[in-house]
Image: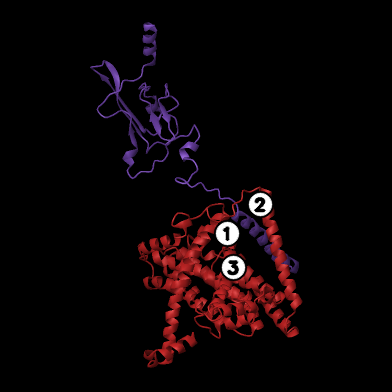
């Protein structure tokens, strides 16, 4: 190390510390960017989410066709659908439609093949719970059956009536 | 304190039977513990909150703001939480030394507080070797840290402890040299005498006395940062490489003792700096005369306020440096100490000695030039700050409370 280098080092240290400290001091008086989730946000966080947000899955049972496409497409088998032939109604009915949100990875592969858009994402994302089983959602009430939606048949009936 | 003890002996019949030394000891212990409870402990706690808030704002965050008004009681919540934690001693650690180490670290810091002045009269013990005593007892911290590192039986702790020992022992030399400059100028080791040798006005402070003492302050400041294990010299506990260094295996209250020491040390660094270079508690004589006329306690309140404001400004600078500079590597740390600070320290000692011989009364012009030069530097500093704010078109919020 030459004498010039020695004193250049000292000068560089002093000037760079000086400049660095002006930058940090300027940040001291800037407005904080913190979003104080969950209780001190200007608007509820759910309202600020984009439309295509992937939250919990929800099934609209009125238009579910029981085609099982979502169950077959799910890569981690978190959807369980059971159907049976109902003797009294002489029809195929849904007896169980469970989604285990604890397993779901929000890939969206179940929503894509759905012919009617019955299975879809909501904006619900706060899944913290003390009990994992509370994340298991059943869309068919226990000991009840739901008749699947039949698009083509209904349309035919409507045309006949007209 | 001795006068107070003498008065007590005169007025209290019970104390007259005892040897006088025992009374002095009792008075010192009582006032020492009172200061620990009433000043050092709350200060260390509150400064932890202040540091977190300042750090947060420098990172454009808010910081702790939930416990109490503006999060002010966060330090109490943290303390209570740590008290309730399980006290873990690793099974392979040396149990006795592991338990002893935090107390040594704590004692080393607290013993130094004994000779820190607050006002012209309020000081626990005005030792005639005051500053020398402070250098000596703060070395006890090294033993505590090395002991904690070694007794933990953990590689990270041991590395942290050894780095700390190397660092603190090295940096005591430039710190001692910088202190020697002040001792040369004041002719005394007593902290009260050093303050009395300075004036109330900034150009009468030791830092502006001559160019050599001006540089000495920076040498002392850098060395104190290194001795206090503060960033950018925090390699003993470097989170990114050593987990938490010497305090890795500690939990609960023993862990808090290390951090208590660190934050109380902030005040110690600042108080020593203010005492040696920034005129301590000195207030202008005219103000003092006016204050004495109002009430005999008022000058002491003013003196304490002066000292405390100066010390807090330095504490703020230390916190501010922590959030500005990156950590030095071990070799850079040693190079800085042995290649730069120690040679420069010797130059400053020789320079000051020569200056005192050449100008025994000091040179007022040099004092004014140094003082106004520093003011000019501050001016340029704030100009640069405003430049950065304008350049980034930042949204401003001057209110420290959110």
Q: Which residue is mark 2?
A: B389
Which SS class for mark 2? helix
Q: Nearer the viewer's eye, disc 1 or disc 3?
A: 3
Earlier sequence position, callout 1 versus callout 2: 1
Q: Could you say which quadrant of the image residue B284 lies in?
A: bottom right
Q: Which mark is residue B307?
A: none
Q: Where's residue B336, x and y in %?
A: 63, 68
**Chain B visual colour:** red
**Chain A visual colour:** purple
Q: Which mark is residue B314?
A: 3
Distance CA(mark 3)–CA(mark 2): 24 Å
Q: Chain of mark 1?
A: B
Q: Which mark is residue B323?
A: 1
Q: Nearer the viewer's eye, disc 1 or disc 2?
A: 2
Q: Chain of mark 3?
A: B
Q: Could you say which quadrant of the image residue B211 lies in?
A: bottom right
Distance CA(mark 1)–CA(mark 2): 18 Å
Residue A25 makes an appearance in the image: yes
Distance CA(mark 1)–CA(mark 3): 15 Å
């Amino acid at each position: 190390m030459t004498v010039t280098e020695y004193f250049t080092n000292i000068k560089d240290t002093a000037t760079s510390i000086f400049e660095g400290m002006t930058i940090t001091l300027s940040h001291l008086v800037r407005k904080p960017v913190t979003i104080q989730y969950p209780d001190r946000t200007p608007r509820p966080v759910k309202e600020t989410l984009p439309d295509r947000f992937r939250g919990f899955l929800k099934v609209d049972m009125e238009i579910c066709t029981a085609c099982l496409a979502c169950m077959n497409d799910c890569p981690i088998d978190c959807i369980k659908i059971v159907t049976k032939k109902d003797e009294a109604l002489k029809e195929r009915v849904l007896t169980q439609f469970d989604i285990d949100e604890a397993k779901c990875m929000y890939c969206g592969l179940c929503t894509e093949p759905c012919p009617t858009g019955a299975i879809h994402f909501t904006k619900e994302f706060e899944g913290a719970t003390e009990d994992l089983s509370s994340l298991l959602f059943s869309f068919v009430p226990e000991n009840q059956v739901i008749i699947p939606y039949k698009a083509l048949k209904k349309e035919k009936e409507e045309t006949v009536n007209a | 304190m001795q006068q107070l003890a003498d008065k007590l002996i005169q007025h209290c019949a019970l104390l007259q039977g005892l040897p006088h030394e025992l009374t002095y000891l009792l008075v010192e212990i009582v006032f020492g513990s009172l200061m620990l409870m009433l000043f050092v402990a709350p200060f260390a706690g509150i400064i932890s909150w202040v540091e977190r808030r300042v750090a947060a704002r420098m990172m454009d965050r808010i910081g702790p703001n939930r416990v109490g008004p503006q999060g002010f009681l966060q330090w109490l919540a943290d303390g209570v939480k740590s008290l309730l934690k399980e006290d873990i001693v690793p099974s392979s650690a040396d149990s006795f030394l592991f338990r002893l180490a935090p107390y040594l670290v704590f004692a080393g810091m607290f013993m130094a507080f004994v000779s820190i002045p607050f006002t012209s009269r309020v000081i626990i013990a005005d030792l005639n070797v005051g500053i020398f005593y402070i250098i000596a007892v703060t070395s006890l911290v090294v033993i505590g840290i090395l002991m904690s590192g070694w007794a933990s039986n953990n590689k990270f702790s041991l590395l942290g402890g050894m780095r700390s020992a190397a660092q603190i022992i090295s940096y005591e030399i430039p710190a001692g040299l910088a202190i020697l400059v002040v001792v040369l100028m004041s002719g005394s080791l007593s902290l009260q005498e050093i303050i009395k040798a300075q004036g109330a006005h900034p150009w009468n402070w030791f830092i502006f006395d001559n160019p050599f003492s001006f540089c000495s302050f920076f040498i002392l400041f850098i060395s104190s940062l290194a001795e206090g294990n503060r960033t950018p010299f925090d390699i003993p506990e470097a989170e990114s490489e050593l987990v938490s260094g010497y305090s890795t295996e500690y939990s609960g209250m023993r862990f808090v003792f290390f951090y208590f020491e660190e934050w109380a040390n902030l005040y110690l660094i600042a108080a020593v700096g203010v005492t040696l270079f920034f005129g301590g508690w000195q207030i202008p004589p005219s103000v003092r005369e006016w204050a004495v006329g109002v009430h005999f306690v008022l000058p002491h309140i003013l003196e304490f306020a002066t000292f405390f404001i100066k010390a807090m400004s330095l504490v703020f600078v230390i916190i501010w440096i922590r959030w500005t500079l990156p950590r030095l590597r071990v070799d850079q740390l040693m190079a800085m100490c042995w290649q730069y600070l120690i040679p420069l320290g010797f130059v400053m000692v020789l320079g000051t000695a020569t200056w005192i011989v050449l100008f025994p009364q000091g040179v007022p012009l040099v004092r004014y030039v140094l003082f106004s030069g520093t003011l000019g530097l501050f001016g340029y500093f704030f100009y640069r700050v405003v430049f950065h704010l304008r350049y980034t078109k930042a949204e401003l919020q001057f209110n420290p409370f959110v």
